[in-house]
Amino acid sequence: MGKRLLCIWLGLMMVVFAQAQELQAKVSINSSRVNSTVDRKVFVTLQNQLTNLLNNRKWTGDVFKQQEKIQCSFILNIESVESQNLFKATLIIQAARPVYQSSYQAAMLNFQDPDVYFKYQEFQPVEFNENRVQGSDPLAANLTAVFAFYVYAILGLDYDSFSPKGGDVYFQKAQNIVNNAPEGRNISGWRVFDGLRNRYWLSENMLNSRYNIIHDIIYSYYRSGLDKLYNNEKDARTNVLQSLVQLQAFNRENPNTMFLQVFMQGKTTELVGIFKKAPAQEKARALDVLSTIDIVNAGIYKQELK
């Protein structure tokens, strides 16, 4: 009987550890733009392999409870088939974080990467080795390098939101991928000269010592702000506004950084909801700040917070 109980206990522990991974990720591959002569089954196989990579690999040394898992989605839009087994795609990455004592998921990352070029043959291994980012075939390794980079970026943002600079180790891992990124014809997004909104600049912004205030902004917005809305809405709203004021000052001193776009993307409805019932003076202050740091949505803020 003792051995039987031990086996049951070990079995339960295996289930617990199997569910201890950090992500609850959904991967979707859209191949509607690809010529109908291409066998769509290839993309179904790849979708399953990428899903397994994200959800079954341990990305940190920590144990996540089921309700603590980071909800995220990766939408890979195949734009064209360059030649046999070579694909050009865009990738939409979305990640959210649960807000304390609520069922609400607050956006952490909502970004479109336009430069995903990769090689894939059905059933080839889809793996990531942080010690050998380029792999034996850089074109094949580029896809998993891109996905792993955004996993670490998501983890960095999530950990930053729970403790000041808590995500540094994961931003460093993302930087390691940038430094050792696959190289080859048509591979893009990893280098300083590949544009102003790419993986290189996201990593640079998050680790630049001149931009340390970024991490305070993230922590203040989520942990001191959103997480306190249930118990103390007034103080929470004050903390959210303070984080936006800090962001405004940061942007004034460092215009056109990628971080501003990354932080503000997908937050319009959330911010309107936070400040719509605020006292007139606080609402006016929020409107003033939001109109300068989220210019694209300034009209919405003026309409909703008037």
Image (cartoon, helix red, strand yellow):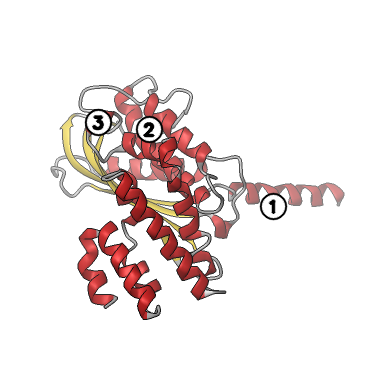
Reading the chain from its start, which is encountered first: label 2 or label 1? 1
User: Circle 2 sits on which residue?
Assistant: 145
What kind of residue is marked 2? Ala
User: Circle 1 sits on which residue?
Assistant: 12
Q: Secondary structure at mark 1?
A: helix
Reading the chain from its start, which is encountered first: label 3 or label 2? 2
What kind of residue is marked 3? Ser
Q: Is residue 74 in sight in this rendering?
A: no
What kind of residue is marked 1? Leu
Q: CA distance from mark 3 to mark 2?
A: 12 Å
Q: Residue at x 39, y 22 (%)?
A: 135
* Callout 2 crowding tier (Cα within 10 Å): few <14, some 14–19, many ≥20: many
User: Circle 3 sits on which residue?
Assistant: 188
Pick the residue in front: 128 or 15. 128
Reading the chain from its start, which is encountered first: label 1 or label 3? 1
Q: Residue at x 35, y 74 (%)?
A: 283
- The picture places residue 197, in percent across and down from the top left corner, at 26, 41
Q: Secondary structure at mark 3?
A: loop
Q: In the picture shown, does residue 45 fall above or below 68?
A: above
